[in-house]
Image: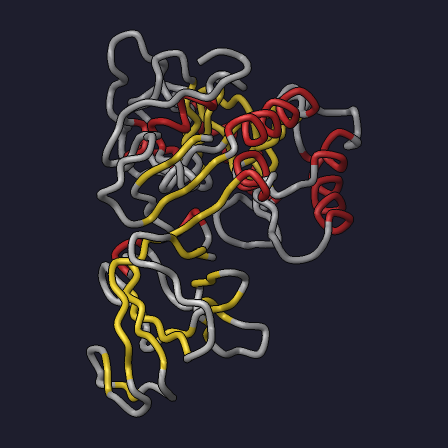
Amino acid sequence: PGASDPPVTGRCPARPVLAVACRDVTIRLTVDRQRWWQHAVDVAATTPGLVPVVKGNGYGFGRAGLSAAAVALSPLIAVGTVHELVGLPAEAIPVVLTPTLRRPPEPPEGHHAPVLTVADLAHVHALATWGGQVVVKLESSMHRFGAARDAAAELIAEAQHVGLRTVGVALHLPLAGDDDARRAEIEAWLPHVDPSLDVWLSHLAPDTYTSLPTTHHYKLRLGSYLWHGDRGALQLTADVLQTRPVVGGTTVGYHHTPVPGDGTLVVVGAGTAAGVYPNPGTDGELRSPFHFQRRRLALAEPPHMHTALLFVPTGDPVPAVGGWVDLQRPLTQTAVDEIDWR
């Protein structure tokens, strides 16, 4: 990829590559190419030490295609597990975020060996014959992975003893709270961290990140903010496969749910197989993720494998067969069938 354009590779299906439109699929992500890429380039230009995250489903874009875009921003790329090392560009230096209890696979010829994460002695001992680079995870207020302050030095020393090279420490910060609280967590750890080690951070606003104490060098892992930060550049839709009139009280769907009145049943090609479920509302009730002409489309029943059955009351606008309805679901949880770059 060039410095100004993300790559577009492949055609149907888009899993796991970036693809252009092919009309025999059901969930489409439309991307304003210029807006999307400009946001990513701007973030990279203003975030020294940026580490793009390419994990899971590739934030809706697919890992293979998104990793090709990521290396245009930074050679370092963070992936979720050792299983996500497959398919990365040769120039990428992968960093595996989740600790592993087994030796990683040998990289293909011409590829870089990964940087692994360790969080306790079991992870270090599992890599005793590997001899690569590691990042030591520190315990944060998440209390998930991570060494406590009284154990971090021992963990780093043991990693060196078995032949591992510690290149940094990582602090995985919670989504709860605000940046002031996250900054306080970082600053409480800094006196206990060797300044020669990079401090890897997450879930931190770029402005807060760039104003951290100059006693240490930092790296910032960014995923959602980097790839989804300009929401106006992204639109998720599902196609309409069939419509039919229905009389109030008619029972429909797998569970014979009665419809509340006269109207139209709309069958949409998006269901649980693609990660499409009702969305939680602020009142605790589940809500339909589908919209048409700025109106929420009611679910006749919860989505199933590859389809959702919707109900439109008489008098409301009905989407046409072959048309598209808006789908509001997290891209990190949705399997996209095609990506249409505009």
Residue 129 point in image, percent of width and height: 29, 23
Residue 198 can be seen, yes or no: no
Q: Is residue 315 above or below residue 334?
A: below
- 198 relative position to 336: left or right: right
Spot occupied by residue 207 in the image (x, y as percentages of width and height): 76, 35
Residue at 28% of width from left, 81% of height from top? 246
Whole-percent x and y of residue 218? 66, 26
Please say if 47 is above or below 2. below
> Which image quarter: residue 107?
top left
User: Looking at this rendering, what residue extends furthest in the front direction?
Assistant: 315
Q: Quadrant of the rendered structure where residue 169 is?
A: top right
Residue 178 image position (x, y, % from top left): 72, 53
* Most foreground residue, 183 or 209: 209
Q: Which quarter of the rendered picture does the N terminus lie within? A: top left
| Residue at x-position 46% and y-position 40% | 119
Count of numbered labels shown in the rendering: 0
Point 38% across, 53% down: residue: 324
Which residue is at 22% across, 83% downward?
255
Q: Which residue is farthest top?
A: 110
Residue furthest to the bottom in view is 249
Note whether residue 250 is visible: yes
Q: Nearer the viewer, residue 17 or 147?
A: 17
Q: How is the image coloured?
A: secondary structure
Q: Is residue 26 left or right of residue 58?
A: left
